[in-house]
Image (spheres, rainbow, N blue to C red):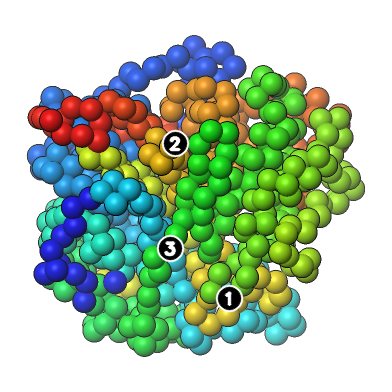
Amino acid sequence: MTRQSDSNEIDRNSNRGGAARFDRRAFLANAGAAAGALGLGATSVAASETGPETIVPGFACDRRQFTCGRQATAGGGMVSSVDSIASGVAAAVLREGGNAVDAAVALQYVLTVTQPHGSGIGGGGFMVVYDADADAVDVVDSRERAPRGATEDMFLDEDGEPIPFERRIQMGEAVGVPGTVMGLETALARHGSRPRQRLVTPAIELAREGFPIDEVFADQIAENWDKFNEAAKEAYSDENGRPLAAGDTHVNPDLADTLAAIKRGGAAAFYEGPIAADLTATVRGAGGSMTIADLADYDVTIDDPVRAEWRDVEIVGQPLPSSGPSTVAYILKLLEFLDVGRYDIRSPEKYHLLGEATSLAWADRNEYMGDPEFVDAPIAGLLDDGYLRDRAAKISVDDTLADYEAGECVDPGVPPGAEPARAPTPDKEHGSTAHFSVVDADGNAVSYTSTIEQFMGSGMMVPGRGFMLNNELTDFSAVPDGPNSVEPWKRPLSSMSPIIVVRDGVPEFTVGSPGGWTIITSVAQTLLHRYVYGLDPLEALSEPTVFTTDCPPIMWEDGVPARAREATAGAGQVWEDESSGDFGNVQVIEIGDDELVGAADPTRDGLAVGVDRGGVGECGRTD
């Protein structure tokens, strides 16, 4: 990966598709699916009439250089994201010769404008980067940190009981020190080839000139209106003070000015000076302790990824403080030892084994995982083959691990190098995030998940600055005990699961999703459906999934057969009475020898965009 010059060195959420229009069951039926097999191949679909071709300079889905669709195939680069405008911007960067990190940086800045309900510069995230020149993977960890004034009991009331979650998410104490800007600038300095000024400009223009909002954005404005501060209400209302509706043009000149400051001054413009002062004033005005010094001292970490062998590939992803890739690998390795592939993709046995494997994984996740700067988590022991074989041996297709009907939960194990110390079960995450993947013509790859936690975060917009603030610290356990308790400068445990699947050292698949806790199961089951059941990328992410923790019941998407639920209930499983809608919004790219296949989850208005550049031959090489 060609890196930029020294002159450009830096000076640094549940979406279950509830508001989306997509009906997974209807999608499968209309596609002629049988047992999850869509038979769509790599057919592309057209972008919407209000799509990126009418907004993004230099980009249109009907130009021969680009291929757009829910699933798309190309040879010179690929982008898959939740937002069609952002996908178009990133594809244009690739088309003009930018690399995967350049495109990812431009895409994330655009998401701050077009997807403020799930992502933005007021939050944080994890970027997994494969550098083809170095033949190495590193991770840029821009997870939010607790301010130094945070206290272990800040989410408890005067009686020592947890403050109700609905109140917690709007507290100033819930806002973590944002990391996205520092993470983007760090990734660009390490791996980028284009100047920041070029990459921030599309987001600035979108914020200043406006764009039509989609139904998901409009629904989130309506659903979160009561938690908005006045700045957010003003930004998301029309000239008559009414909440913006689908199709309305949204302009955000304050955000345009903020991004223009970052364009000029880089990370320092965000973490020091007037923007930092306004940000901390907003947090402190809502009861938080964040200071200007907290912002000025914020630091990303550059991590070695967590790695786990599975089947004949390697799962490579973000390590702690995200539990995601480690727990994904844990579940998949258990299922491998259980030989889940011998059962039909929609059989009772498959769903039963998924539920049991997920419950074991969650018991160990909650027991041991936390920020590695504060907690010595036994990840190697948790992913040890011998330990996981012993855990898998506890699972039977005819019985359950605990008496779920009586309210029992699954107990954690004791992996090598660990001492048991039962932690309180944290509050269930109902977060909103955004995931996207980018692969360029030279074989560089990015798998990136970013977040502001809940839809619309804390509901607080920084007045005069145009961006929403996260409520990420609600990912800590409210009760001050266990590895994920609140501590100053600590990062809360995450479920974000940006992953690159590697075969013989070379990336062949990228995957990730939003969705709070359901991120882990959405990603794990996408990989299961692709690698064990042989589904194409779009099929794999569209196949209905299930979710549970160490304390069932099992939540399920439309399309999980009633007969499977009834049969497993006879073995002791407990299911939610009704479908929970759709989990997550999975984005994937499959990397072949001579082509790239991108797929965007139909639960929202995402788009996969392929790029063909003159002179590109075999994927990853130029002629």
Q: Up-down: is 197 above or below 160?
A: above
The residue nearer to you, when weighing 396 against 552, is: 396
Nearer the N terminus, badge 3 or badge 2?
3
Q: Residue at x 13, y 30 (%)?
A: 623
- What label does residue 503 carry, if any? 2
Distance from disc 2 to disc 1, alpha carbons, whole Å, reads: 33 Å
Single out the mark in the foreground, 1 or 3. 3
Q: Up-down: is 606 above or below 241?
A: above
Q: Secondary structure at mark 3?
A: strand
Q: Position of residue 169 (x, y in %)?
A: 54, 67
Q: Amino acid at mark 2?
A: Arg
Q: Is residue 98 left or right of residue 379?
A: left
Disc 2 residue crowd, few under 14, some 14–19, many 20+, Cα 10 Å:
some
Q: Residue at x 64, y 40 (%)?
A: 333
Q: Position of residue 92 (x, y in %)?
A: 16, 41
Nearer the N terminus, badge 2 or badge 1?
1
Q: Which residue is labeled 1 in the image?
A: 374
Q: Position of residue 516 (x, y in %)?
A: 55, 53
Q: Is residue 247 left or right of residue 493?
A: left
Q: Which residue is labeled 3 in the image?
A: 303
Q: Position of residue 294 (x, y in %)?
A: 40, 83
Distance from disc 3 to disc 2, alpha carbons, whole Å, reads: 21 Å
Single out the mark in the foreground, 3 or 2. 2
Residue 536 is at least partly visible in this image: yes
Which quadrant would residue 298 be assigned to in this image?
bottom left
Q: Residue at x 25, y 35 (%)?
A: 620
Distance from disc 1 to disc 3, alpha carbons, whole Å, reads: 15 Å
Q: Secondary structure at mark 1?
A: loop
